[in-house]
Amino acid sequence: MNKVIYTPLIIFITSLWGGSGIAQQRIVNIADKMFDQHKYVSAQEAYLKAVERQYKNAETLKNLGDSYYLNGQPENAAKWYKEFIESYADQVEPEYFFKYAQSLKSIQDYNSADNYMDQLLLSRPEDQRANLFDKKRDYLERVEYQSGRYQIDNLAINSSFTDFGATYYEDAIVFSSSRDTLLFNKRVHKWTEESFLELYLTKYDPENNLYSDPKPFSKELSTRFHESTPAFTNNGSTIYFTRNHDITNKNEMIRLKIYRSYKNDNGEWTIPEDLPFNDNTYSTSHPSISPDGQTLYFSSDMPGGYGMSDIYSIAINNDGSFGMPINLGNQINTEGKETFPFVTQDELYFSSDGHPGLGGLDIFVTKINTPFLDIINVGRPVNSPQDDFSFVLNTQTEKGYFSSNRSDGKGGDDIYSVLQLKPIRSFDLTTVLGTIIDNDNDEALNDATITIYDNENNVIQEKVSVDNGNYIFSDNEKLKDAYLITVNKTGYKPYEHIIYKEEFADVYEKLIKLEKNYDKDLALDKVNKSSNELENVFNFELIIDPIHFQNDFTNISNKSKDKLDELILLMKKYPKVYTDIKSYTYDNNSDNVIAQNQAEAIKLYLIDKGIPEYRLSAKGVPKNTIKPEERLKLMMVVPLPIHFNFNSEEIRPEVETGLTKVIELMNTYQSMKMEVHSHADSRSSYWYNKQLSVKRMRATLNYITEKGRINWRRIRGRAYGERRLFNDCRDGVPCSEEEHQKNRRSEFIIVK
């Protein structure tokens, strides 16, 4: 955004500038005063003069960053927040971790931004913004999942100054603009160094997709202060809009208020009325009217809210009076800014910097009048790393407008038209569909019974294939819990398929091939080994952490004994299972003697409880051979996991023997249940590795359930991506291919 520099002030500062510390302090004092009066452009110039001459302290750097941040220039703010945080780490308030993270997002440095959100979470664990980030660390993937649903265009009517807040009015749109900044004798707002905002009208010609030259909307509504963000009732006879009111103390913060005006019989607007829920001590702004005209939504920083600004609703009574403002709650509102609400029949759109997004204000949508809200980022291209706000949509035409200060615009804030091409996508399954065919000749099979189950074996829905073998399940909210598809048809063997949907997917499509002449005998070409050759299948590893011992380091704690008793029950239940006991040293350089003694103590405990010694081994090992989060888990783990090639989920021929052993074990013990834990190495992104481990889990489970004919209810899967590395080969650590290979694995764990 181009700014009009406040030249007399800069000349004054330059004339004061000298080599003395007193003169330097005077300039900083002037900058502080302007900053406190929200004259951010002028304050920036003064602070910059100070830091150019190395007159820096925590307050100066912090205020300089804020002057850019609060004026919608986060890219510049990032530079000064970085210097402030790195130079004065002991003086950084938690809020500046959030501001710096948001500023880093504006330059699309999301990895660094996430690191500072982690800093916010550590320093203020109750912060909702930090917790929302922690729950949705995949926020970028969520944004991309919703992206591509809109077509946008920068309107030709935008000026080189601020234009925003377009809304529908009859056959036109009305918006806010500071476009007369360069005219003479106009008051200039010192926050932005632009003219005060006024309402403008432009008529739209849909046939030619053209807008008329903008004209001032109404002289009755125009004052020497800001007028912005209009909202009209459906009949166009009432307008609500935002205005900042006059103040007596020039050092006082100028607050915003919502005003209402009616159109009289002459088509003129009445003198606007100051609404009763306004107040001189806080702001109310950015109104939106529900389609039935009975509720007004707005943004406010009134006392009792959650953050810098919250979204409220208030009832509009039949006589034009109002109820009491109702805060929409902390599912929507955060410690940050929630603002610019817009409501349709059943949806609320709003802008927020508190919910995870691309940077600055992002536009979000949620269903209204529901107890459980899913707050969804509407995605690109509507959202960007800069501020995106003031979204409106005609639900009949799927057309609307929003505003943004993105870098490729014409001015500070620009208005963009928007066409919604597709509706918001659900993150959960809404549709399951496919076709049933004969495996031998690909002939479509009608009259097959298809049943959808959840993971508790409850029936969600059942149908019969028709129309060339097609089936479709939809309009059932419980489909989000779909876990298993079964198919039954006379003359064909029963079919089961576990649904492994992508992390975000609303449609699951499956082509199902049915086989004739079901053979109940297990057909595994690779299971032609004697029981002696399969002995290692039953050899498991027990992991015990040293903290489970008393102070003498060899007496097992009662808590650990409880866990060991669970293991003993499993070993008695599965008498062919052998256990390798490993106890780990306190650090990489510790003596192994204590660890060995602890392992022996565990072994003796198991022997005393009736486990034969020949089924046990005990060993102390260095700490760095296993990650800390694994040590606390007392479980039996197959010691030889299967491994995968780099960037692949394909089952390699050489690991099929290991899978065969797992199948043989589960066939030996028909009641045994297992989990498959699949992993990836640290190379590539967190999200990509998460997806890759999901694919590896699927491949492993499919082999066991389909080739091994193990019932799906007996084996489940978990995908960990790069979160549980076997060694220290994390990002930035040089490792050999052999070391990375150890992390590309599927492990098998007895759970029952």
Image: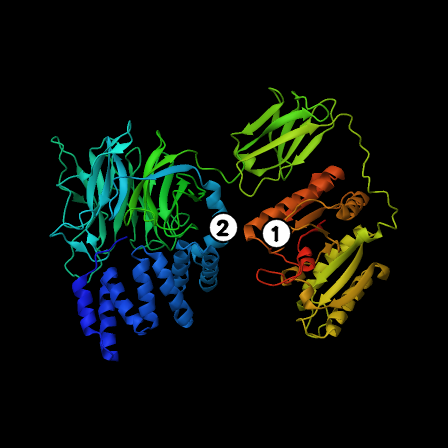
Image coords of residue 530 (percent x, y): 88, 46
Residue matched to label 1: 720
Q: With respect to residue 693, does 500 lie above or below?
A: above
Q: With respect to residue 700, does 732 lie above or below?
A: below
Residue 359 vs residue 552, the one in the foreground? 359
Image coords of residue 271 (percent x, y): 13, 41
Identify the residue at horizontal 76%, vertical 70% (top origin): 596
Image coords of residue 234 (percent x, y): 26, 32
Q: Is residue 302 visible?
A: yes
Residue 739 vs residue 452, the one in the foreground? 739
Residue type for callout 2: Lys
Within 10 Å of the Cα at label 2, are there few (<14), some (14-19), or many (20+) other Cα atoms? some
Label 2: state its secondary structure: loop
Residue type for callout 1: Tyr
Q: Residue 422 falls in which quadrant of the image? A: top left
Q: With respect to residue 638, does 515 lie above or below?
A: above
Q: Say whether disc 2 or disc 1 marks the residue closer to the N-terminus.
A: 2
Say left or right for 454 vs 101: right
Q: With respect to residue 524, does 739 lie above or below?
A: below
Identify the residue at horizontal 78%, vertical 26% (top origin): 517
Residue 161 vs residue 261, the one in the foreground? 161
Residue matched to label 2: 136
